[in-house]
Amino acid sequence: MLILSGCSEQRLFTVKAVAAGVSSLAPFFEEDGSLGEDSKVTSQQPHSGLQQGNSPGLYGGTSKPTVCDVDRLKDFLTDPDNRQKAREWARVVGITPDRIEEYIDGLTPVLLRHDTLVKNHDYKKSKAVPFDALLEAGIAVLVNDQGLPAVKCSCGNPLRSFDKDPEKISVKFEDGNKEWDGYEKSSVVAVKPSPQPLERIALVDVDNPDRGINRPVGSEGESDTTFDATEQHAVPSVAGMTFNQASQRLSELGLAVAYSGSGDELPTGDASVTGSDPGPGTKLRFGDAVALSLGEGTESGSGSGSGSGGGSTDPSPSDEESTPGGGTPSETETTPGGGTPTETETTPGGSTPTETETTPGGGTPTETDSTPTESPTPSDSTPTATPTATATATSTPTSPPSTTRPTSVKPTPAEPTPVDPTSVEPPTSEPASSEPVSSEPVSSSEPATGDPAQSPA
């Protein structure tokens, strides 16, 4: 008999520190200051380690000349002499090389206000080499329409979302990247996709924190408008909304979202919100956070990328990134090993299996309604054939009424009687249908009874 004792050592993920103003050793573009420059920004204390890309005040801006030369980046990547770099760059961001200019035109230059976790990429031996990085506050980046960092401006390196647990990292300061003033491991953030594609990004002026900047997505600052960041807004009533609806509503008022939880994922987009702290009517200034209370049984998941509006998700990672611990930031693991269960598999006793509908390739279905519906998770622990509704958007079950189905219990033998047999056939006379009656997910186009109204635009 083998007896194991003691506690296993917690696995930590190595993250390379990248300080503002320090050149990369193997950049895509030579860091000579012609492509973009970082700024001196004091790292702010975040309200939570995980933040959605639409969080007001997540990023900063400046009234000075642009911090990223977008046109120069496009010229560099479309130059025939840089064809191989362009192929690798496009592969990392999930596009074809002929779409590079179009893709870059949809990005927006901002400054990081927090030490931010990303997946960075060096260019070595004609290949893009991924590595987990912590970018210091003040670094200039281009973000996409989901608020995710996409390019490091000074070197042109493509960026992707950090896909590990921010609480299980080991930051390494090396290659000239010394530990900067104000660094605290507990204060780093990882950015998750906005529930809806952004039309503008609400920034804080890093030179004047009392002033806010509204920057249209895809612009470089020429169309900026400013607003009073000290103006206060009342917390709206969010009880009964889904997590995505509540976060979208708060964002429209210039308020950020926090929640009590841990791990590398936000709550699912359709998680039921039961209240907030502070409560409705409380006055808060731009960028302040509202903590959402969620219904019992709500679990963290990948719903942050499946919000209303059907926005694009972070593109699939490159071949080098599809290793254990990596993968697409918005993963939906419905079965052990990540596979999709077959529809004809039955559970012991002949009960009808629970079916999980996924899109080809196992990705999260793109929703077009403001209230996304998570795919039900198969459960081996349910002893009966009656499936359990998994949606937590409201307190009223969203699955259709249970329909009587054959069970695996055989009828007890009895003496023949002159009474005609009932119209109900024996449970074993016909195989169970491979298509469950009540486990089909609620259609995203027809909200279930009791679903909250969509948040105002």
Image (cartoon, grey):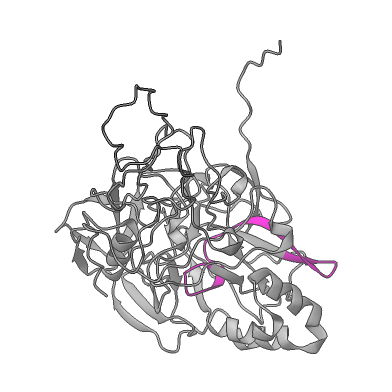
Residue sitting nearer the eye, 124 or 89: 89
User: What residue is at 60 percent from the left and 75 percent from the top?
Assistant: 37
For the N terminus, the quadrant is top right
User: What residue is at 63 percent from the left and 36 percent from the top?
Assistant: 11
In the image, residue 432 above or below residue 124: above
Residue sitting nearer the eye, 74 or 352: 352
Quadrant for residue 244, please give it.
bottom left
**x, y percentage for residue 152?**
61, 70
Residue sitting nearer the eye, 291 or 90: 90
Q: Residue furthest front?
A: 418
From where the camera sits, is residue 20 visible?
no
**x, y percentage for residue 44?**
43, 57
Q: How many labels does the image show?
A: 0
Magenta-colored stretch includes residue 211:
no
Quadrant for residue 388, please give it.
top left
Q: Left or right of 42: which side holds 399?
A: left
Residue sitting nearer the eye, 335 or 149: 335
Q: Left or right of 108: which side holds 391?
A: left
Q: Left or right of 282: which side holds 352?
A: right
Magenta-colored stretch includes residue 127:
yes
In the image, residue 433 above or below residue 71: above
**x, y percentage for residue 170?**
62, 43
**x, y percentage for residue 443?**
36, 63
Q: Residue furthest top?
A: 1
User: What residue is at 41 percent from the left and 80 percent from the top?
Assistant: 215
Q: Residue furthest right?
A: 125
From where the camera sits, is residue 231 visible?
yes
Magenta span of residues:
122-148
For the C terminus, the quadrant is bottom left
